Structure formats: structure tokens, C-alpha cells
């Protein structure tokens, strides 16, 4: 498209200054990309113009179109963000920076036909069709950035969507393996993203273009059938529109009636959902009524239902209960005079604009950039939706949660107080409970749906009223995370359950680690200890982290004691607490070269006959016998005080500590005592 056509199509209400900004941005982009070409051979700046035109159709402010023209300059040319700021100001610079950050990823995920200067990049490996759509192939970290950017400034994501749409329109110039991979990513992520923003225009085209490359045979089959039936369908639609006009005029209901195009991918999904063939799909014949106000919507619905018999289970009231992307309309299907169904949508003009342009329909060109209240509510909803996802640090898990919780079809459930909650289709009472409140989810023990008790794997349907039965205390079951049981379907609920168990395990490990260390300190006769200093010396941020690792076994007690005993003050305490030597030499220990030397057993490591041992000369007390792997010996600095010793004639008995782990039960201590007594062991 020539730039002049873009200027002619700019939204109404643009001031001369707005148009001048767009013109300057084009001139700057043209100069920056001079000499660069797409895979198609056309000048690269043509892509920038196409992106700007898509944004213009969404009627966005001038700085967004300017940023659309400049969106690849920082990534692909010597232009810097400082240059953009100097020429176009902070607002345009912010938007270009946002798009650039989303574009720092492998070329395949960008989905573009990049400039010739980058054509020598290494080809990506071929991806077999069966592997398409895996989150590993979708560069999860970049997609995570895209989602979080949507909560920060939706304008950045609109530019990214426009960029992706034009790249999909020209995807035929890319290598085949890249076509399939980019198309699958678009179908999995970017089309649902456009839907979440309520932008129908972008959604349906992204879906159809992607479907063409992902399943080319199915695409050709449906497209061919549509083309073959088009003359009959158009004739039937004209007849249906005329009948509706006569009917509504008779009831004094003003309406704009039009045939509603059915798109190829939506037909394919309907075929899958209903497990049917194209010829049996009734809603390929579809019309739309646009009426002045909401009362007229319901008046028109009443007249239509009186005249033609409604098709069961095909009525949806999205005016009373809007979709999560704020979509509103009445949907119905009726049996027409030819005994074949026709689908009918009824909405106001405002609802129509919102459905077509989504969040972009709410820009109001006002001084100071103020937006209407509904726009602010949409942004608030998006940020709220992203808040919990921002806590998920694993990028692949984040993308999985977006696909399962944000992009899936929705159902609308009611609380006992009548509040409506939208959830992903297939959600269970546990998913509902966690959506209401994390604590309610943790304590969920049962549910009533429409007044009847149901199992926790019950699939909720639109219109269900759900009451959660809770315990006073307690937490979730690990079974809830078992996919085979089908108890939890949303990633959001799964994430909260995992956090609960991790916290529980951390608390248990913290208590175990602290108890282990404190018991060792008590045995060594150590009182006050600077835990913060010790944790820092071992590379931990807090003592709690240190004790958790000690509790799990990641940190050994011997390593902890080694570090601990390096302190000179602690060494003096350990030495002072060494056991008193017996009054006479012991035959149990043989000190090499020194017969009859006083010796005593160290309490820190309790050496037993058979252990590899070493002696340590304690002032005035002879030799203290340690195990060779005793932390105190390993850290001893006065190596000349160490003695080579061995076991002699052992007749005396040695006290040893015994640690027993068992499940608590009645008679446990009695059974342990009996077992020890049976072995002639004194306690």
C-alpha cells in the first residue's frame, strides 16, 4: 500500500499535528530501512506501512500509528531509542521500546520476513507436524513478556498483533517449515490474545490465515465447500433478511440487518465440537441485527422466537452475562420456513463496535489522552488477570497457564449470592473455590451445584450456582494434582495448590533443620549463636533458608558444624567442654609411642570400637579421642596436637545415642523397651 493511501485512511478526528507526526514517522522509517527488503523482494518499509494501516483500522491514536511505522527501526537498523525520543518524544519512544523488547527472540517466533541483511542466519530445525504447538517451540519467555506487557500497556501488544497479522498475510514467502511453525504459534497464542482483547477483526483473520498453513487439506475442503454453496447461501440470506425486516417493521422495531460471514476456522471448530460434517452445520447461514438499544434487543428476540421455533440449547444471553472480554450480544438459532436452522445475533451499535474492535474501540481522542470509563475497566480487568500470572516465574508454566486459563472458552458460574464468575470451560468445583479465594480452595471438601451435592470432579456449566462446602481447618489433597483424576483443570488452581504444599514442606523442613542444629548445639554445650552470620558465611540470605536445606539434607550437619567451629570463641567453648579424662589409663585406646596416656572419648562424635579414630591432646586432660571424620578434627588448626591412636583391648562398654523414627501408636514405647531388653541392652 502506498503511504498516501495510509494518510487518506487515518481515523477521523486526527488533528494536523497528528497527521504531521505520522508523516514524519514514515519518512524516518523509510530512511532507516532504505536498501532492506523482505523475503518477497519488496522494500521493507512496505511492511511498516501495512502495520500502520492495520492499526489505523482500529482507530488508535496517532502516536500508536507512528510507533507502528517505527517498530522495527531499533531492532534492525542503527537507530537507537535515544534517536526515537529526540525525534518523536517519550510516548513514541516508550511504545517502540516495548515492541523491541518483545522482539528480542529467535526469528522464527517473530514470524517475520526479515530484512535481507539478516537472511544469512542459521536455518531453524524442521519441526514435524505432530510436534507443532508444544510450548517448548513457542519461546515461552518471550510470550510471557508479551502477556505481562499487555497488563502494563495494551498499545504495545496491539502493535505486536498488527505486526503478526501482516506477517501472516505474507507468510507464503517463507520456507515451508517456518510457515507451519509460525502459523501454529499464531493459532495457539496470538489469535486467542486478540480474542482476549475483544478484537474480532484481528482474531478471525489470524485464525483463518494460521489454519491455512497448519491444516492445509482441511482448509481447502471447507473453503471449497463454502465457495460451492455461496450462490445458494447468498440467495437464502437475502430471503431471510427480507423476512426479518418485514417481521420487525410490523412490530415497529428498527434494525439494521446484514448477513454475517462465517469464517473457515470457526466452522472447523464447530465441526469438531459437534462431531459433524460441513453439510450438516446449520449456522453457516447467519444474520446479524443491530438495533438502537438494549430493550430493542430483547423485543426483537421475542418476536423472532414467536415466529420461528428456537433450536434447543442454542440460546445465549451475553448481554446479561457478558463474556470475559466484555463481548455482548444475544445469540439464538431458529428453524426457518425451509425447516433449516439459521443463526441470529442481536446487538446494539455500541456492542457491535466493541465486538469488532474490542479494547481499541474505547479510545477517545481527547486532550490529555483520557479514556472512557469502560476502557479503564477493561485495562483494570487485564491487569488483574495478569497479576497472579506475574508470580509464576517458570516461563513455560506461565504460557501453559495462559493457554489453559485465559484463552480457553469460558463458562459463567454464580455464587450463592448471585455474583457471576467466569471460568475456563471444563472447570470443576475446586477451580471455582480457588477463584473465589485461595483459603476457600484449600479448605474445600465438597460442593453443591444448583442445590445438589456433586463430586469434586463435576464439570461446571454456564448458569450453575455453586456452593462450596469447607472444613474449618486443613489443606488441599495431593490427589488434586493428579491429572488422571480430573479434579482440577485450571493452571491457576494448580499453582496455588503447589504453593501450599511447598510452603508446608518448607515449614516442616525448617522445623526439622532448626531442631537438628539446636540439639547439636546443646550436646556441644553452646549457648548463643549468631545464626544470621553463619547463614551468610554459608551463602544463604536468611537463617530460615539454611535450616530448610539442613532439614531436606541439601546441607549436611557436618558442613554446618565445620563452618560453625571456625570461630575462635566457639573453639574455646568446645575445648572447655571436652570430657574430663578418666583417673587411670584405659586399655581400650593405644596411643602410638606413648603407653599409659590418659584418654577419653569426645562427646561431639562419640567414637565406637571399629571407627577410624584420632587423638587430640587437650591441655591437662590427656588425649581426647575423636572419629577421624569429626568436623572439629577436620577444622583443627593445631595439627601438631593430633595423635595417631588405635583400638586396643576393648572390655569396657560405651554409651551410644540411638535415634528411632516411627509412626506414633499405642504401645510404641513399650515395644521398643521390650526389644532392647531382649538384646540385654540397658537404657
Image: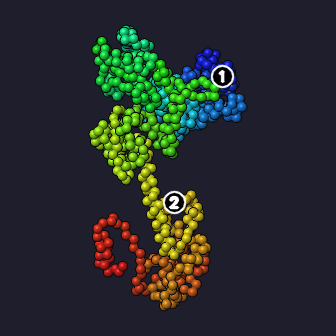
When asked about the image quadrant of residue 648, the answer is bottom left
Q: Secondary structure at mark 1?
A: helix
Residue at the spot of label 1: 18
Residue 675 appears in the figure:
no
**Quadrant location of the N terminus?**
top right
In the foreground, 540 or 249? 249
Asked whether, in this view, residue 574 is left or right of residue 488, the answer is: right
Instruction: Name the residue located 61 percent from the left edge and 25 percent from the top edge.
Output: 366
Q: What is the crowding at mark 1: few (fewer than 14 residues within 10 Å), some, or many (at least 20)?
A: some
**Quadrant location of the C terminus?**
bottom left
Residue at the spot of label 2: 544
Asked whether, in this view, residue 239 is left or right of residue 581, the answer is: left
Instruction: Name the residue located 44 percent from the left edge and 78 percent from the top edge.
Output: 608
Residue 670 appears in the figure:
yes
Mark sitting earlier along the chain (1/2)? 1
Task: Please provide percent x and percent y for residue 342.
Answer: 34, 17
Q: Are marks 1 and 2 in contact (CB under 8 Å)?
A: no
Instruction: Name the residue located 53 percent from the left edge and 61 percent from the top edge.
Output: 543
Instruction: Name the residue located 37 percent from the left edge and 49 percent from the top edge.
Output: 443
Q: Tell me the CA gap for discs 1 and 2.
A: 58 Å
Amino acid at each position: 500500500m502506498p503511504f498516501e493511501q495510509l494518510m487518506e485512511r487515518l481515523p477521523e478526528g486526527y488533528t494536523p499535528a497528528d497527521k504531521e507526526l505520522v508523516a514524519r514517522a514514515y519518512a524516518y522509517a523509510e530512511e532507516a530501512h532504505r536498501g532492506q527488503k523482505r523475503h518477497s523482494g519488496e522494500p521493507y518499509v512496505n511492511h511498516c506501512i501495512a502495520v500502520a494501516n492495520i492499526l489505523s483500522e482500529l482507530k488508535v491514536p496517532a502516536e500508536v500509528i507512528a510507533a507502528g511505522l517505527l517498530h522495527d527501526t531499533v531492532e534492525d537498523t542503527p537507530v537507537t531509542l535515544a534517536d526515537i525520543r529526540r525525534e518523536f518524544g517519550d510516548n513514541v519512544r516508550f511504545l517502540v521500546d516495548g515492541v523491541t523488547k518483545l522482539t528480542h527472540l529467535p526469528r522464527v517466533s517473530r514470524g517475520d520476513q526479515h530484512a535481507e541483511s539478516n537472511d544469512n542466519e542459521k536455518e531453524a530445525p524442521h519441526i514435524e507436524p505432530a510436534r507443532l504447538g508444544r510450548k517448548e517451540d513457542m519461546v515461552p519467555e518471550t510470550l510471557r513478556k508479551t502477556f505481562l506487557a499487555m497488563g502494563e500497556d495494551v498499545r504495545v501488544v496491539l502493535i505486536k498483533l498488527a505486526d503478526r497479522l501482516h506477517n501472516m498475510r505474507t507468510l507464503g514467502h517463507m520456507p515451508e517449515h517456518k510457515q507451519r511453525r509460525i502459523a501454529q504459534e499464531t493459532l495457539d497464542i496470538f489469535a486467542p490474545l486478540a480474542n482476549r482483547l475483544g478484537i474480532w477483526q484481528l482474531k478471525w483473520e489470524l485464525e483463518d490465515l494460521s489454519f491455512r498453513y497448519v491444516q492445509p487439506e482441511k482448509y481447502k475442503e471447507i473453503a471449497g465447500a463454502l465457495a460451492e454453496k455461496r450462490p445458494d447461501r447468498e440467495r437464502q440470506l437475502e430471503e431471510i433478511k427480507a423476512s426479518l425486516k418485514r417481521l420487525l417493521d410490523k412490530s415497529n422495531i428498527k434494525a439494521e440487518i446484514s448477513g454475517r460471514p462465517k469464517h473457515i476456522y470457526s466452522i472447523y471448530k464447530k465441526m469438531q465440537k459437534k462431531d459433524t460434517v460441513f453439510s450438516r452445520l446449520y449456522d453457516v447461514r447467519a444474520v446479524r441485527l443491530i438495533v438502537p438499544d438494549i430493550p430493542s434487543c430483547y423485543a426483537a428476540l421475542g418476536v423472532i422466537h414467536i415466529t420461528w421455533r428456537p433450536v434447543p440449547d442454542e440460546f445465549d444471553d451475553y448481554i446479561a452475562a457478558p463474556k470475559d472480554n466484555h463481548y455482548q450480544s444475544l445469540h439464538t438459532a431458529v428453524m426457518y420456513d425451509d425447516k433449516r436452522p439459521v443463526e441470529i445475533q442481536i446487538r446494539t451499535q455500541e456492542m457491535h463496535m466493541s465486538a469488532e474492535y474490542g479494547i481499541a474501540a474505547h479510545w477517545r481522542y481527547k486532550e490529555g489522552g483520557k479514556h472512557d470509563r469502560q476502557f479503564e475497566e477493561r485495562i483494570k480487568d487485564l491487569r488483574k488477570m495478569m497479576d497472579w500470572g506475574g508470580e509464576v516465574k517458570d516461563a513455560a508454566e506461565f504460557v501453559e497457564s495462559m493457554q489453559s486459563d485465559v484463552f480457553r472458552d469460558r463458562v459463567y458460574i454464580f455464587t450463592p449470592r448471585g455474583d457471576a464468575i467466569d471460568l475456563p470451560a471444563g472447570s470443576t468445583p475446586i477451580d471455582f473455590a480457588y477463584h473465589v479465594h485461595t483459603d476457600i480452595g484449600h479448605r474445600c471438601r465438597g460442593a453443591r451445584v444448583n442445590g445438589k451435592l456433586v463430586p469434586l470432579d463435576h464439570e461446571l456449566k454456564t448458569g450453575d450456582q455453586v456452593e462450596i462446602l469447607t472444613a474449618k481447618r486443613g489443606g488441599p489433597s495431593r490427589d488434586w494434582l493428579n491429572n488422571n483424576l480430573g479434579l482440577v483443570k485450571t493452571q491457576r488452581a494448580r499453582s496455588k495448590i503447589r504453593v501450599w504444599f511447598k510452603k508446608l514442606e518448607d515449614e516442616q523442613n525448617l522445623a526439622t533443620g532448626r531442631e537438628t542444629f539446636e540439639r547439636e548445639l546443646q550436646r556441644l554445650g553452646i549457648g548463643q549463636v549468631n545464626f544470621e552470620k553463619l547463614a551468610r558465611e554459608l551463602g544463604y540470605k536468611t537463617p530460615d533458608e539454611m535450616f530448610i536445606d539442613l532439614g531436606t539434607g541439601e546441607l549436611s550437619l557436618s558442613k554446618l558444624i565445620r563452618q560453625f567451629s571456625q570461630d575462635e570463641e566457639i573453639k574455646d567453648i568446645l575445648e572447655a567442654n571436652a570430657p574430663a579424662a578418666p583417673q587411670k589409663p584405659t586399655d581400650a585406646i593405644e596411643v602410638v609411642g606413648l603407653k599409659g596416656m590418659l584418654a577419653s572419648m569426645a562427646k561431639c562424635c562419640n567414637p565406637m570400637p571399629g571407627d577410624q579414630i584420632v587423638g587430640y591432646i587437650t591441655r591437662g586432660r590427656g588425649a581426647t579421642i575423636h572419629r577421624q571424620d569429626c568436623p572439629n578434627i577436620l577444622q583443627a588448626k593445631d595439627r601438631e596436637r593430633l595423635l595417631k591412636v588405635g583400638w586396643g583391648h576393648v572390655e569396657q562398654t560405651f554409651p551410644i545415642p540411638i535415634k528411632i523414627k516411627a509412626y506414633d501408636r499405642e504401645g510404641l514405647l513399650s515395644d521398643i523397651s521390650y526389644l532392647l531388653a531382649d538384646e540385654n541392652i540397658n537404657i
